[in-house]
Image (cartoon, grey):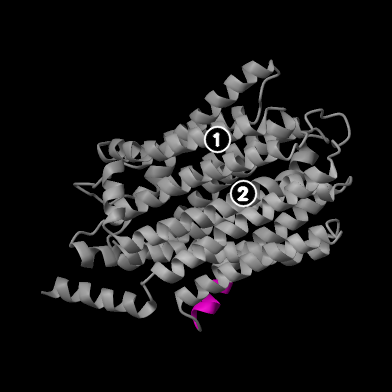
Amino acid sequence: MKLTFKQKAAFGIGAVGKDMVYALSSSYIMYYYQDIIGLSASFVGLILMIARVFDAINDPFMGIVVAKTRTRWGRFRPWLVSGTVINAFVLYAMFTAPDISKTSMMVFFAVIYILWGMSYTMMDIPYWSMIPAITSTPEDTENLSVVGRTCAGVGSALIAMGTVILVNKLGGGNERIGFSRIALIIAVIFVITELICAAVVREREVKEMKTATVKEMFQALFSNDQAMVVVLAIVLINSALYITSNLVIYFFKYDMGGEAWTTNYTLFSTVGGACQILGMMIVYPLLRKKLTNTAIFKCAISAAVGGYVILLAICFSGNAGSLGLLLVPGVLIFAANGILSVLTTVFLSNSVDYGEIKTGHREESVIFSMQTFVVKAASGVSVFIAGLGLDAIGLAGNSDQTGPVAAQSEQTLQGLRLLMTIMPMVLLVAAVIFFIFKFKLTDETVRRNARELAGRKER
């Protein structure tokens, strides 16, 4: 079955909506419950870690449920639609916290966030798992994966660009009200985009669908050393990204400060989000014409680390209030992240062919299930680390919505600068060192593997 442009577009629209929801949660849930609601950053981080690790473990079980589903609408679309509707309601509730005691709020947050993760899994697993059921053409399968990942990046970038300033405008200066209203808007967009995806994208008849248990995922990973290298790189890169995305808002609010901090943060995020999209859609394809994928990977890591070094130098040279200077490292970091998000998907896809040659078994669905598993687990751990760091440096939240922005000590601000730069740099350097010594899937190796598999099929 050959994919039409309409189907590809609908699949991409679905990715935009679902990653707008995911980005709102992953980037602002810590800020909302720690800074606005007033819960301990360590407690919020702990709940986020527990919920995301549980959610990661829960993914294979959702895959089994989907595989056993038989309806007139197919395996995937019923879960895609029902999971979306439930998650949209939970998202709105999560960013519309009731006015209750601190103890009750802790219980509310723990319950609502776990529910959000479970309901998101209900639609996320069917969304990615239905790719093989849409088409059996290898070129279309790869193309659809790239479309999905790229459009997911667009959804994340849209949230980075507009959330804070919209929260301020929609709430009339009250962030608590503003987040409630923006969550409602995004929940509605989410439902509309997934309904479009479900209405246009049609499943072909697949008699049997392979699902992976947690045990099978790790067995497939340990038997494929190149998949393990890529997965570890994904963990390190995503951990650096999540630490940055959760801490940068605190930098603009308390370090850069001023009445225009929301505008400055929005401009920084808008430029960064645009650079991330350009990195995926323009810079990577242009670099690919001249360089190998491994060379591009090293360049992207170097650019990101260089960006963090420049950011640290700007902060400690007394120029933290200069948005123009801050945009320089922002461009480097965000563009590099866009390139790396595409590259890691390509590398993981290439590791599937490598694994088939090595073991005789093609574990495509298992390997990509592992990607979802480790990304969620890594995000949970990195957010917990960020929460511990915020409490360790003594950052005072700003839960009083009617008062001025809380003042922070110079020691706290210095700690914040180090947290949002040194930790990501260490993770990215570790990723590139491990990659240099362990990664073997060069462009020539990938082409050779493809020729060998083609020859086996002909025989």
Q: Check if residue 81 falls in the magenta segment.
A: no
Q: Earlier in the sequence, mark 1 or mark 2?
A: 1
Where does the image place residue 254, in percent across and percent down from the top left?
A: 81, 44
* Separation of residues labelled 1 and 2 (CA atoms): 13 Å
| Residue segment shown in magenta | 283-289
| In the displayed structure image, the side of residue 89 where residue 397 appears, left or right | right
For the point 35% across and 67% down, the residue is 350
- Tell me if residue 190 comes above or below residue 292 in the rendering: above
Residue named by callout 1: 48
Identify residue type, mark 1. Answer: Leu
Task: Please tell me how crowded label 2 is: few (under 14), some (14-19), or many (20+) other residues with Cα within 10 Å.
Answer: many
Q: Residue furthest left?
A: 459
Q: Secondary structure under badge 2?
A: helix
For the point 53% across and 53% down, the residue is 238
For the point 70% across and 45% down, the residue is 163
| In the displayed structure image, the side of residue 45 where residue 165 appears, left or right | right
Residue 119 visible from this viewpoint: yes
Residue named by callout 2: 243
